[in-house]
Image (tube, helix red, strand yellow):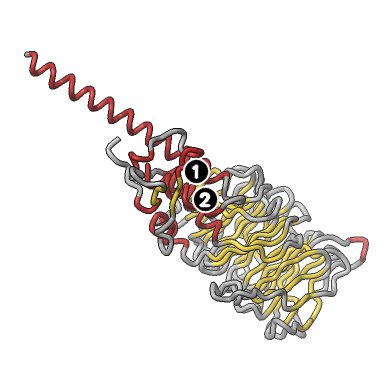
Amino acid sequence: MLAVLLVVAGLVWKRERDRGSAQERVALAHGLALHAAELRDAAPGTARDLGLAAVKVHSDGQTRAGLIDTLVGERGNELTPDASSEVALSGDGRIALTGAGDEVSVWDLTTWLDPKAVEKSDRIAALKGHKEDVGAVALSFDGRTALTGGDEGATIVWDLTDPAKPIRTAALAGRKNAEDAGGVRAALSRDGRTAVIADDDGDVTVWDLTDRSRPVRLSVTRAPTSPVFRDLGLSADGGVAVTVDNDGAVTVWDLSDPSRPVKSADRALPAKSAEMAMSADGRAVLVGNAHRAGLWNLADRSRPVSTAVFDVPLAGMYDMALTSDGKTALLAGPSDSAILWDLSAPSRPARLAALKGYAREIDSVALSADGGIALAAGPGGVSLWDLRDLAEVVAAPERVACRGNTNAEIDKADWARYAGGADWSDYGGEGSDSLAVCFISPGST
């Protein structure tokens, strides 16, 4: 009996010791991850090493998310410190438009996306001609056609076949008199041949841009509710448009016959939305407001079906972007970070990473067709991220962090500063003045 009691007592003691050690490892890992987040701007190298150490000590959702955010942050660059309220990207992410004041800058991002290029190209052209601030920019998939809309109500069509030498080809007729001046929203089909303009008269106008020098107005339709539009999206084939007005009402427009647009679902989608984004095929639309976003299937345009609703840790919603397949979303609000979401399984939306930029807040975002390139703009400038290896970063952040950096170390001073008194000999630092981060082991504690 005594032997049995001793065995039981030993097992209980071991279990409690293991539980205490596990709790200590979790606390250490979370502490390291927190310090890593605090150091991302001031000391990105240290932040990466501490974040990696956190995952090595204890891998869970919190530590992995922290390391992923740090690694994604390393893939960001400041494109320009100049304030910008609007951005647009070509499908391949090579041509970018950034709007500031009464002009729009044209960028060739080739050198920005080449890790071997030391010198990064400046803007290659400027689109001018508006009397007031530019409030809308749109770019065709191939980057050869652009629209710019000014607060005076004018929309200009640009030929960017040679992006360094843009040609103003036409101006789309707007308001009838200057007293009606106000902003516009603009969208282009994939081939740049169809344009939709939503203006502050409450009109939705469809244009044929097959001949960019001689646009043909196909239809003008009055909005069903508020005359002021917050957002506008158009499918790649120009067959479906979605508008969000100033009251937050979302309207789906069937443009199968562009000369006779049909409001196919102006009550099925949620009211009080702030922004929207559409997949290229027009079958999915993402709408959202402060704190919450929802994904809707538009396979039946007259009866949208809700496929996902998820909370967004933002104080508000300023802009959204979707990849062509609708599987990745970028959401931005009144903060210096935009958030990437994985929508590949609509019933289980998952946060991928936060894109922390240089702007004080983010007003506008854009994604390339495959999500490999991202732009975010605001009062503090425009930031660019190269996300072409994002899938690997999310799947195996430890491997990515150690690749080409296997000699990363944490010295005793930093361990003492950030590890809260934990004995680093338990994690592989015994008998050394530094701890090899990529080879940290939880040890026997």
Identify the residue position indicated by label 1 in the image.
414
Say which quarter of the image contains residue 365. bottom right
The quarter of the picture where the N terminus appears is top left
Q: Is residue 353 above or below residue 234?
A: above
Residue 225 visible in the shown view: yes
Q: Residue 127: x, y in percent?
A: 78, 75
Q: Nearer the viewer, mark 2 or mark 1?
A: 1
Asked if residue 62 lies left or right of residue 90, the reply is left
Q: Is residue 148 above or below residue 68?
A: below
- SS category of the residue bearing label 1: helix
- Please tell me how crowded label 1 is: few (under 14), some (14-19), or many (20+) other residues with Cα within 10 Å: few
Q: Earlier in the sequence, mark 2 or mark 1?
A: 2
The quarter of the picture where the C terminus appears is top left
Q: Is residue 357 above or below residue 270?
A: below
Q: What's the residue at 55%, 59% (across, down)? A: 74
Q: Nearer the viewer, residue 29 or 335?
A: 29
Q: Residue 37: x, y in percent?
A: 54, 45
Identify the residue position indicated by label 2 in the image.
46
- SS category of the residue bearing label 2: helix
Contact between marks 2 and 1 (CB within 8 A): the answer is yes
Amino acid carrying label 1: it is: Asp
Q: CA distance from mark 2 to mark 1?
A: 9 Å
Amino acid carrying label 2: it is: Thr
Residue 204 visible in the shown view: no
Q: What's the residue at 41%, 48% (across, down)? A: 434
- Please tell me how crowded label 2 is: few (under 14), some (14-19), or many (20+) other residues with Cα within 10 Å: some
Q: Residue 292: x, y in percent?
A: 58, 44
Q: Nearer the viewer, residue 77 or 139?
A: 77
Q: What's the residue at 60%, 72% (across, down)? A: 112
Q: Nearer the viewer, residue 340 or 51?
A: 51
Q: Which mark is residue 220?
A: none
